[in-house]
Amino acid sequence: YIAITLVTDTVNFSKMNISESNDTDDDSPPPFVIRNIGNILVNLTIHATNSLWNNTAAHLNTSYFMFKADNRTEPGSFNFAASNTTWLNMTDYNVTFIIDLNYNSTNDEAEIDLNLTVPVDEPPGNKSSQIVIWVE
């Protein structure tokens, strides 16, 4: 059967300044962590329903909001060579990014790293986006 859970389901970048970039690759802040609790290998797709930024030049499908798969916490958890492990722009359509996420308890987790860059003319305030992960 197919079943996953988000071990870490929120990423908080806290305060960022204009033109500042930050990512979760160094675990500060911690990335999303997803676990396969089913009993078959699964593939994951990802997209966002809205942009983090008000600036129209920095909406989805731009380098201001990016993601990648990582397996630092449990190496060998997925097919690293076939998965998207370099930064990709977050899109508003599904992108397959993790291939063959394992279900064995010793290597059933993957990290979803995020990379943000604050646009030059972004107004201050809290920012949020809903990220959707599909499993097949």
Image (tube, helix red, strand yellow):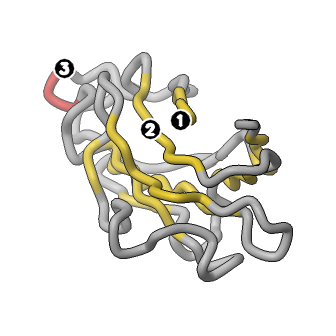
> Which one is in front, 104 or 50?
104
The image's mark for residue 45 is: 2
The answer for how far apart the CA atoms under marks 2 and 3 are is 25 Å
Which mark is in front, 3 or 1? Answer: 1
107 relative position to 48: left or right: right
Point out the image quarter for the N terminus: top right
The answer for how far apart the CA atoms under marks 3 and 1 are is 32 Å
> Mark 2: few, some, or many residues within 10 Å (few <14, many ≥20)?
some
Q: Residue at x 51, y 70 (%)?
A: 25
The image's mark for residue 136 is: 1
Above or below, 52 relative to 98? above
Secondary structure beneath label 3: helix
Q: Give how far across and how far down residue 42 sits, in percent.
A: 58, 48
Above or below, 17 relative to 57? below
18 relative position to 46: left or right: left
Which mark is in front, 2 or 3? Answer: 2
Q: Give how far across and how far down residue 106 sits, in percent.
A: 82, 76
Q: Which residue is mark 3?
A: 56
Q: Give how far across and how far down residue 96 sits, in percent.
A: 36, 43
Above or below, 11 relative to 57? below
